[in-house]
Image (cartoon, grey):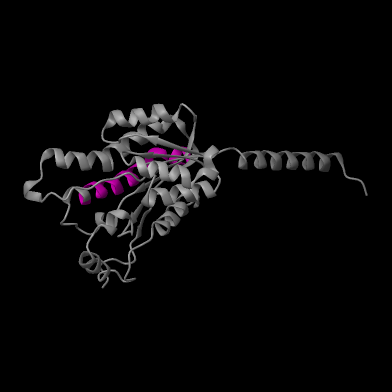
Amino acid sequence: MGTSEAENTQLRSGNATLNDSTTARHKPNYALVTGGTKGIGLAVAKKLLQDGYFVTVTYASDEQAAKNIKAELSDYAEKFEVIHQNLNDNNDAQELYNKFIQTKNKINVLVLNAGCTDRTSWKNLTWDNWMHVMNVNVNVPAEIIRRFDPLFENNSSIVMISSALSVYPHAVSVPYTVSKAAVNGLALALVKEYCDRNIRVNAILPGFVDTQWQKNKSEAQRKRITDKIALNRFAQPEEIAEAVMFAVKSSYLNGALLKIDGSYCYR
């Protein structure tokens, strides 16, 4: 039995839609991960590469870590870029943008992972101490988002790495706790700014993660921490990266503050 002209037209239309969809799926997607040469940032970069993204990572000062990651990820050399860039003030955000657009003209995923702390006691804390943490953890990330705004495609994803210590007061570093609480507020506020373009903004709140930052603590310090965690251990960077990828991939997750801390303070 033959097909009618109307059916043939519908079939051709369906095939065109399928071809357009296939082409869209094979368009290159670009990701930027700040602080991406070690720890959580490196784990995120690896998962993005495995998922087919072209990935750019930044680092501030650790040249050896940058060399190590280039060697480790040599199989992805054509899809991987490392940029040396301090992220301490708004001019640094512009410099990063200028370097990025030398080889890219769009961005689909932005993971703001670079951060710092300052353990100066509250009574001895200076204005410069305070502002350095605020700049690195929240002011510069906000400026990066503003600068990169023209490059965001519709349906892109912004993921900010906050901290569970934005919820639980952290007496060792007041500016760290306050800056990460501000990151949470920034993520929520930007949902309204980007909803018209279907750009999703989420924050990940890791607890204590077994990175070099934590490994430098004494065994006694580490035990005091794990004794407070229901799962009785530190997270692995890959576990936090899985949460980041969930935020990247989940098309209905928006304005979420995902606390990934093994239930800290539950013991």
Residue 185 vs residue 145, the one in the foreground: 145
Q: Give the x, y percent position of residue 8.
A: 83, 41
Q: Quadrant of the C terminus?
A: bottom left
- State whether residue 245 appears in this view: yes
Q: Residue furthest right?
A: 1
Q: Does the magenta run of residues contain 234?
A: no
Q: Quadrant of residue 3?
A: top right
The magenta segment is 177-199
Residue 57 vs residue 183, the one in the foreground: 57
Q: Give the x, y percent position of residue 7.
A: 82, 43
Q: Is residue 164 left or right of residue 153?
A: left
Q: Residue furthest bottom?
A: 267
Q: From the viewer's perspective, is residue 111 above or below residue 262?
A: above
- Disc tally is 0
Residue under the point 28% across and 54% down: 213
Residue 147 vs residue 255, the one in the foreground: 147
Q: Give the x, y percent position of residue 163.
A: 29, 54
Q: Does the magenta run of residues contain 195?
A: yes
Q: From the viewer's perspective, is residue 237 above or below residue 71?
A: below
Residue under the point 40% across and 32% down: 148
- State whether residue 191 appears in this view: no
Q: Give the x, y percent position of residue 227.
A: 25, 71
Q: Quadrant of residue 75?
A: top right
